[in-house]
Image: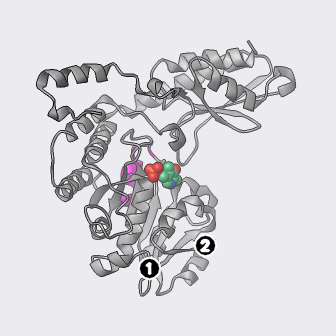
Amino acid sequence: MFGPSLLTAKASEEVFLEQAGRDFFKELGLRTFINAAGTYTSMTGSLMHKEVTDAISYGATEYVNLDELHDKVGERIAELLDCEYATVTSGAFGAMTIGLAGIMCGMDEKKVAQLPDTTGLKDEVIVQKGHSIGYTHALINTGANIVEIETAKELEKAVNDKTAMLWFLNANTDNGEIKWEEFVALGKKLNVPTFIDCAADVPPVENLFKFTKLGFDLVCFSGGKGIRGPQSAGLLLGKREYIEAARLHTPPRGTTIARGMKVNKEEVLGMMVALELYLSRDHQKEWELWESQIKLISDSALSVKGVKTEIHVPPHANHVPSLYIRWDEKEVGISTDEMRKRLRDGHPSIETVGNKEQVGITTWMMELGQERIVAQRVKEVLENV
Ligand SMILES: *Cc1c(COP(=O)(O)O)cnc(C)c1O
C-alpha cells in the first residue's frame, strides 16, 4: 500500500499512529480467543513477551550478514545452555530435517546439493516403534528411511553401513523399551549419532541442559512453545560438527533441501531473547501460579453437581499442571463437544482440548487473569445457563 521509508518524517509518523490503532484481526474478520488448550500450532502456539517483540522490531530496522548473525547467536545460545554449539532453526521440525541432513552429508557440498537423492549416503534412521509418529516426516524429508525396532537387541541388529542416525522422541519415552541412557550408550557403542526431539519439553527448564549432558549428539526444541519465542523458530543444540554441517543446508545457500526453512534475522533475535528471558524467569513461582489457576478452574467446575475433575501433569512433553473435566452426561445434560463449542462461541471465546470423555484445560498459555473468566464460563456452561 505504501512504503513508509519513502514518506517524510511527519507523514511516516501519521502512518505509524494510524497503524498503531489498527485492529488487524478484527479487520480481517478473525476472532481472537483465550487459549485454555496449550501450545497448538493451529491456535498459533504461544504469545511472545514484549522483550521478544522488541527484539524482532529492532531486527527489522538494519541489515546484517545472515551467516554472521547465525554464527554469533549460535555461540551465545551454546554459552547460555552450556553445550558445544547451537543454531536457531525453523521450528523443531526444521531442526530435525537439517540435523539429519548435516549428519548425512557432513561438510561435503556436493552431497548437500544432492539431497534428497541419497545415492551413496547413509540414509537409514533407526526409531523405536512407539516413537514412530508423524513427526518422523521431518526426517524422511531428507530422503532417508525410517527403520523401526522395539528392543536394544533389534536396534543392534538393525545397524548397518547405511545407518545414519538413531532418533528418540522424548514425548513418547514411556512408549519405548529403550530409555535415554541406554539409547545414548547404544549410539556410542555402535558409533551412530543420536538425536532427541524435545520439541514440547520445556518446562522443565532443566531439559534445555539435560539431554546434551546425557550425551545425545543433537537435541531440538520448539521456539514457540514453552520458551515463547517466534512460533516458527526452534533450537538445534549439540555437537558443533553436526550443527555446522546442518547449517550448510540452510539459507543463504540456495540449492539445498532446506532453502525453504529460512530463519530471518528478526526471528533469530527473537528466539535468542526469548531464551534469555525464559532462563531468567522464576520457574518455581510460575509453576505455583499455574497450579493455583488450575485449582481455581477445577473448584469452579466441581461446584456443579455431577462434575468430576482430575488435575494431572504429563510426565514428558507439555509438563505443566493440567485439568480434565468429566461428567455424567445424563446428569449435566451437555456433551463434551457441546461444552467445548459453547466455550468457543461465547464471549470471550475460549479454546480447550478434549474428546468424548473429557474436556482438557491448561492455563500456561493464558494471560494473567483469564483463568477467572475461564473458571466462570466453565461453570456457566456446565450449569447450562
Ligand atoms: C510441536 C512438535 C514438533 C514440531 O515443532 P515445531 O517447532 O512446530 O516445528 C515436533 N515434535 C514434537 C514432539 C512436537 O511436539
Quick check: is 209 in the magenta stretch?
yes
Q: Which residues lie in the magenta part?
A: 202-212
Q: Position of residue 215 (x, y in %)?
A: 38, 65
* Nearest to viewer (mark 2 / mark 1): 1
Q: Which of the labelled discs sits on residue 117, or is there none?
A: 1
Does residue 31 sit above or below 276 in this rendering? above
The residue drawn where x is 54% and y is 23% is 293
Q: Residue furthest right?
A: 330
Does residue 359 sit above or below 138 in this rendering? above
Q: Which residue is labeled 2 in the image?
A: 148
Q: Is residue 5 visible from the viewing direction of this image? A: yes
Residue 230, located in which quarter of the rendered image?
top left
Q: Residue furthest top?
A: 385
Pick whichever, 28 or 48, lies toward us.
28
Disc 1 is placed on an element classified as loop
Amino acid identity at mark 1: Asp
Q: Which of the labelled discs sits on residue 302, or is there none?
A: none
Whichever of labels 2 and 1 marks the residue nearer the N terminus, that label is 1
Q: Is residue 159 left or right of residue 23?
A: right
Colouring used for the render: one colour
Does residue 149 sit above or below 374 in this rendering? below
